[in-house]
Image (cartoon, rainbow, N blue to C red):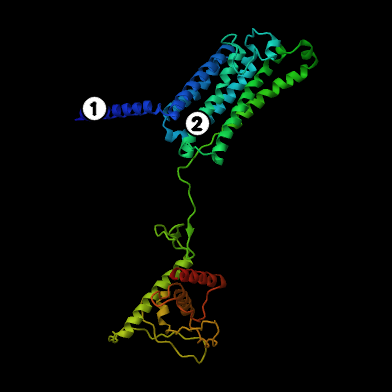
Amino acid sequence: MWQRRRLSRCKGGLKYAVDAAFDWFRSLLSPQGFAHVLALGVFLVQMVSIDVFLVRYSSSLSLVTLIVDIPLFIHLAWFWREESAYRAAPVQWFLYSWMQAAKVVVLFCRVMPRLPNNVDGEAVLRGEGFSIDGTWFGSLNSPSMLANILLLTPVFYALLMFRSSKAIFGSVSKRVTVDLIMHYDMLWHVAIDMVDQVDMFYYARLPEWVGKEIVENNRKGIVLIQTVVPFLLFMSIVLQAQSFPGVVRDTWTIPALWDADGAEPLDAATRRSPSKKRSLPPEHRQLASGSEGYASQQRASTDSRTQPPAPASPVPVADTRIPITGSDAPYLPPLPHVKTSVSSLSSLRPPVEPLKLPEDGQGPPPPPLPPLATQAQRTGQAVTFAASIVSGDRHTGPPAVTHVRTSLNAGEREQISNLERARRRRVQ
């Protein structure tokens, strides 16, 4: 049994490898797949050639760069699909630029001055010797050969940019857009900068290509130039590591538009998306719970008016009464020994008829308010007032404002008024 499972796993892995190889060969027929193969070849040729120069003219310790070069080559070969180019290419170019910057400094300071030169200095100044276009190769270890190997860097950059362009823009665009112009403008600028960097390598052999009189008269200046150029090369290549565009996320997060009541997000098309809800602050949750209790009480009171009253069951009460403020004020009926809350205390208040104002907004002044009871009842009135504004009765229309005195501050009253306006907009 165990051997069968192992054999099935081996067959599954072999099938996956065969399918991946078939897909890879099929991708070579596309321009992006061909660019991927060229990028692998350019990177491998440049890596091996530079390591040969470093080992022969500098030191064998330069092979420590293989710690990064080999994983980078595997990374290039692994992410061969077009869909993964926009994620893999920025990382590949970043690591490549830092390693190339370190190699270029060693090549300029240790390798370039030691390379043999079989060309006359005047021919070099005319462009016949040290040539960045590679028209002449004195030998495989000549300065021209090293310059042409370094010129593979902009080629490698252009191939990576071409592979990621389709993944970034979705398809090969046939129209000229701003994004496409910026993409290829960056490509040309970076390529031209890299050509200038390679052209700066001739400063490492400047005393051999100028006259002896110029060297004797400007010895300090030549030494200063040869000291500054390595720093310029390193900084320019390192800064170009940030020049590769890429997309970090597949989808861009758009902030949701929340409704005025803070309960549900709004969508641009439907203006309503009940899939997500935001948690309200504690004071808003208290008002919302009070509004639900008040709405249920109003429905219960409406049903009780249409039906005959049922006989009340005796409830044991205590001989305690809650006095209302004022010496001559009457007493409230005794409260039962039950578990009460702020929302239940609101039911003890007698119903207050809402004051209906005319359409022009002018009317008689509101009647004087009765004296308020204890702090518990004042809290119940405040919650009831908030509930009457927030919930209302959607079957009969928007509720009227009840003129009762509450313990809410100015900020809470403004918040309640905002909620009422939002509710009216939804009803309309």
Relative horizontal placement of residue 344, taking residue 124 as reference (left or right)? left
Query: What amino acid does circle 2 point to?
Result: Phe
User: Looking at the rendered structure, which numbered label has been put on residue 380?
Assistant: none
Decide which of 134, 226 is in the foreground and name it.
134
The residue wearing badge 1 is 7
Q: Secondary structure at mark 1?
A: helix
- x, y percent for residue 1: 19, 30
- x, y percent for residue 393: 40, 76
Residue 140 against residue 64 in the figure, above or below: above
Residue 34 against residue 248 in the figure, above or below: above
Residue 175 against residue 352 in the figure, above or below: above
User: Looking at the rendered structure, which numbered label has been put on residue 162?
Assistant: 2
- How crowded pointer 1 is (Cα within 10 Å; few <14, some 14-19, many 20+) is rated as few
Decide which of 111, 242 is in the foreground and name it.
242
- Outermost residue to the right: 217
- How crowded pointer 2 is (Cα within 10 Å; few <14, some 14-19, many 20+) is rated as some
Nearer the viewer's eye, disc 2 or disc 1?
2
- Outermost residue to the bottom: 328
- x, y percent for residue 241: 57, 31
Instruction: Return the disc, 2 or 1, that comes first in the chain's sequence.
Output: 1
Q: Secondary structure at mark 2?
A: helix
- Outermost residue to the left: 1
- x, y percent for residue 249: 47, 42
Where is the C terminus found, in terms of image quarters?
bottom left
